[in-house]
Amino acid sequence: MSKKITNIELQDKERRGFFSKVGIALLGISAMPLFNSFGGSVALANELPAYRLKDKKNLKYHGERPLTAETEVYALDSDFTKPENFFIRNNGVPPSMDKIKERVKNGWTLEVSGESVKDAKTYTLDELKSKFKHYTYALTLECGGNGRGEVIPSTKGTQWGYGAVACGRWTGVRVRDILEDCGIKDDAVYIGYYGVDTKLTGEEVAPISRGVPLKKALQDETLIAWEYEGKDIPWVNGYPLRLVCGGYPASASGKWLSKIVVRDKIHDGEKMATSYKIPVEPVRPGDFNYKGEMKIIESMPVKSIITNIKNDTKFKANKNFEVRGKAWAGELEVNEVYVSVDYGVTWIKANVEKPINRLAWQKWSTKIKLPTKGYYEIWARAVDSEGKSQPMVLAQWNPNGYLNNSCHRVSVVGV
Amino acid sequence: MFKKLFVFLFLSISCLFAEYKINPDNGLIIDTNVELVENHCLACHNSGLIVNMNANRDAWIAAIRWMQESEGLWEIPAEDESKLLDYLVKHYGEKYNTRRRLPLPILMQK
């Protein structure tokens, strides 16, 4: 057995060596199980530089094809997520920058069509910018599978830690204004989007085409955006145009947006039938054969993260220090955040700031102390405006490992 | 008798300690049936989706069925699929590397 352990340690060492070389700080992340699950693949790590993006920082890459990477939780400490820290989740192959530039040169267009649109129209990007009023909102986008790495039994899909989330200020036009300009029929119930990314199999078709109920599309904060944090949207996050539906799984916010369809039924685009759905009735953990009714995930559940403390940080015993982070609750607001250093025996109420606007994440902070020397864990737990709290474990297992909002924790040592 | 037992123990232990190499070209552990994974899985996605996952046989089957249903994965002959699953479960099987409370059915199986 000892030989086996030594081998694993060696691989870890080699990996760490590699990561420090490429400048990705791996230690101190909050999801150590994920680090372990990086797969015993030194070779994979060695492949990383080829697809690491130069304009991205503090990301932990999960895979190349499809390209996926989450933000290190400590990089989410800034008020808004910086463009270079925005997580990456692809279902297919992103359009190349050359392909995008070619389209932009000819005038990037957004088509609005579908059976429930009165007057189908196509706008150029310039028309969108000049014809409609601009709005800026900070919106939280979280992958529906964020936290999947701690789902037991494990399910398919990217084994995310806690960093597949971002909140920043998006600027664009309201979907509502566009739909009003085209006119929508009385039977409209849903919208769907199409981007210009392509399938992993090489087919030149959309790898994902999801949608949201019309009531979500018509909200003030639902945007067709071209700017993120005052700059062009980063290439891999949807440049030059992205649908942004904050509070819903980020898969609803289509990247490289080229078409919106207004539907008289629930949109039936790619990945609407089998993905981003959870069982209506709870299922036994590990039941991959569940064939019961499924429902589409809409509002994401309440969640919080500790952003200013890395694992194994040392603090002087019996001395106050600050714990802070972010909390969000899908379509709802976060009312309270509590912190515990004794595994939930006692909870300390944190100060929670109001969101800058609806669907933006909220800053929270408090001062705590470690009563003695020794090993502690800091747990954070948010409560939403309907009184729903984060659970300590996965609330309900589902075959696709979605919606794990169990509380975030970091390890600390009193000295 | 003791000799037999010794040989048996030796073989079992060697088996436990067997070290596997990783293919530098694709990141997969080199072992019997790895070519099935290379042929059927890496055609579309890279090994990141495989080596990141530690899942039981049912979860791997569910992943394959989902890819066949919606991602354009072809039918795999039953015998090959079984071997492919053997490889995946052996090297990328379920690992409970967490201190969180395990779901009850999992605890009861142990």
Image: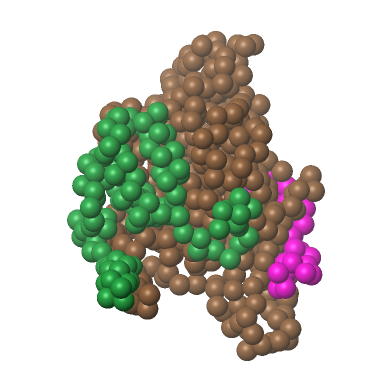
Chain colours: A brown, B green
Main secondary structure type of the part rendered in magenta: loop
Using the image, determine if residue A69 lies above or below residue B58. Answer: below
Using the image, determine if residue A182 lies above or below residue A414. Answer: above
Q: Position of residue A23 (x, y in %)?
A: 35, 70
In-front residue for pair A240/A160: A160
Q: Is residue A343 magenta?
A: yes
Residue A359 visible in the displayed image: no
Q: Which residues are magenta?
A: A333-362
As drawn, which residue projects farthest toward the front? B1
Q: Position of residue B36 (x, y in %)?
A: 24, 44
Residue A91 visible in the displayed image: yes
> Which residue appears at 71% of the width and 86% of the height?
A372
In-front residue for pair B58/A29: B58
> Which residue appears at 38% of the width and 46% of the height?
A236
In-front residue for pair A254/A317: A317
Question: As drawn, is A106 to the left or to the right of A371?
Answer: left
Using the image, determine if residue B10 lies above or below residue A145. Answer: below
